[in-house]
Image (cartoon, rainbow, N blue to C red):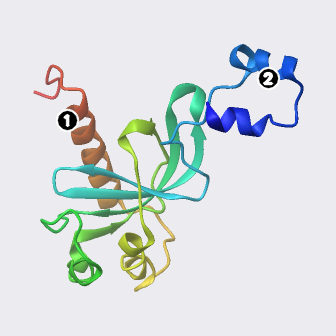
Amino acid sequence: MVRSMSSQSGSSQSGSSQSGSSQAAPARRDAFQAGQIVRLAQDQARLYAEVIDSIASRDMVWARPLLLVDPWPEDEFAPAPAIEAIAAEAILDLREQSHLLWPTVLFKAVLDVEILPLLPYLYADKPATQADPGAAIALGQFMAQLWQQQWPGPDLAG
């Protein structure tokens, strides 16, 4: 309320009294900006992605996967040296995989200190030129497990 009043301090009294009903809904604190790096976590795996767009009307995020780290170190808040000790085999390049449209509530913002040590793995050997079928399978399994973890239902695979 204080924010809305200070933003309208130059308006007339009649304009400020109408602001309660005509004012747009405040931005959600979990809305993300295009280009922001976010992550999804499932058990001991983390998927890092770049936000393409945040669709506030549907509470969804359109994101481009960057990499999947599986397993992640035990300590969720592992310092950079522990992150750098992750085996290269545990990091999959997902830059050429399908984009995601996923509920905003499941994404977490990523701090620079978390993602910067991982970026060299994306560019170490080769630039991404083709979609890796193994990465596609790993991404699909990660997303299916995350979905099942969030919204458990009947097991249709069996």
Mark 2 surroundings within 10 Å by alpha-carbon count, few (fewer than 14), some (14 through 19), many (20 or more): some
Crowding at label 1, few (<14), some or many (≥20) Cα neighbours within 10 Å? few
**Position above or below: 20 against 101:** above
Instruction: Note whether 73 is above or below 16 in the view shown.
Output: below
Gap in Å between the C-alphas at discs 1 and 2? 46 Å
- Dot 2 falls on a residue whose secondary structure is helix
The residue depicted at 50 percent of the width and 78 percent of the height is 127
- Of labels 1 and 2, earlier in sequence is 2
In the image shown, does 27 or 86 lie closer to the viewer?
A: 27
The label shown at residue 16 is 2
- Residue 90 image offset from top left, x and y in percent: 22, 70
The N terminus appears in which quarter of the rendering?
top right
Left of 61 or right of it: where is 26? Answer: right
Q: Nearer the viewer, mark 1 or mark 2?
A: 2
Name which residue type carries label 2. Answer: Ser
Image location of residue 121, percent across then percent down:
37, 79
Residue 84 in the figure: left or right of residue 51: left
Which label belongs to residue 149?
1
Instruction: Give the side of residue 92 with respect to residue 154, left or right.
Output: right
Q: Quadrant of residue 16?
A: top right
In-image side of 37 versus 41 (left or right): right
Q: Percent x, y for residue 35?
A: 59, 59
